Each structure stands twice: as structure tokens, then as C-alpha cells.
Amino acid sequence: MKTYREFIAWQKAMAFVTDIYKITRSFPKEELFGLTSQIRRSAVSIPSNFAEGFGRKGNNEFLRFIRISVGSLYECQTQLEIARNIEYIKDLEFDSVLTQSKEIEALLRGLEQKLEQR
């Protein structure tokens, strides 16, 4: 691939970020610098680290940044679960973004395996 934008994992991660921003708009104002900020930051980190790793041009570096993206994804999943538990997110919204995140995880893990084999 010539650019990181061609990867489905990156495309889905970008759509995920958009959905996270939409969902967190309804969080209480007192969470703006708390959970809202943390969820958004971890979500943004997923496609951002992917792109940065691709830009490094070495397979080992790309692999390292994919693993960082997965870590950010897990962080975001955990924060979303916290938000659901304290009733900032409805179950339906949570289920939707969790499904999205699992699809992204599968794509990232698949790419991770391919890079490990090289």
C-alpha cells in the first residue's frame, strides 16, 4: 500500500473517532477535562499511531505503532465501559461502539500477524 489511508483498519478507526466525539458531546460538562477528554484522546490515538507507524517505513517500527494503537483501543474500551457503568452512555450506544472497536482490533491484530511473519 502506498499510504496509510488505504488501510481499512485506519478508515474504520477514523469513523470510530467520529462516533466517539458524537457520543461524548452529551457527557456532563464537568467531565470535559476528565472522562470526555480521556476517551477522545485514546480514540484519536488509534488512527494517529497507525499513521505514524506507517510513516516510519520500517516493518518493526510499523509493528510497534500498531501495538500502541491496540493499547489505545483497549484503553478506550475500558473508558467507554466506565462511562456506561456511570450511565453517561446508553447500552445501545455502548454496544455499537464496542462492536466497532472489536472490528478494528481484529484488523489491527491481523496486520500485526502479517508484519510479524516478515
Image (tube, rainbow, N blue to C red):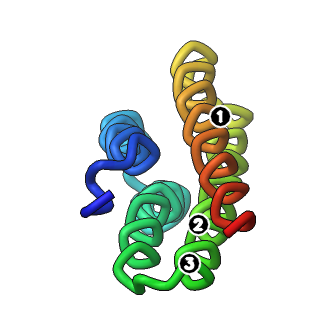
Residue 23 in picture, x, y percent from top left? 40, 34
Q: Nearer the viewer, residue 21 or 1?
A: 1
Quarter of the image with the N terminus is: bottom left
Residue 112 in picture, x, y percent from top left? 67, 59
Residue 52 in picture, x, y percent from top left? 39, 78
Q: CA distance from mark 3 to mark 2?
A: 10 Å
| Disc sitting over residue 66 in the figure | 2
**What residue is disc 1 on?**
102
Q: CA distance from mark 1 to mark 3?
A: 24 Å
- Residue 88 at least partly seen: no
Would you place residue 45 above or below residue 62 in this image?
Answer: above
Labels 1 and 3: the sequence-earlier one? 3
* Quadrant of the rendered image containing residue 25: top left
Left or right: residue 30 compared with residue 85: left
Q: CA distance from mark 1 to mark 2?
A: 15 Å
User: Hey, what amino acid is under mark 1?
Assistant: Lys
Left or right: residue 69 compared with residue 29: right
Q: Secondary structure at mark 3?
A: helix
Q: Could you tell me if the residues under marks 1 and 2 are in contact, i.e. CB atoms within 8 Å?
A: no
Q: Nearer the viewer, mark 1 or mark 2?
A: 2
Q: Residue at horizontal 26%, vertical 54%? A: 5
User: Hey, what amino acid is under mark 2?
Assistant: Ile
Q: Residue at horizontal 37%, vertical 69%? A: 51
Q: Secondary structure at mark 1?
A: helix
| Crowdedness near tag 1: few (<14), some (14–19) or many (≥20) residues, C-alpha within 10 Å | some
Q: Secondary structure at mark 2?
A: helix
| Disc sitting over residue 53 in the figure | none
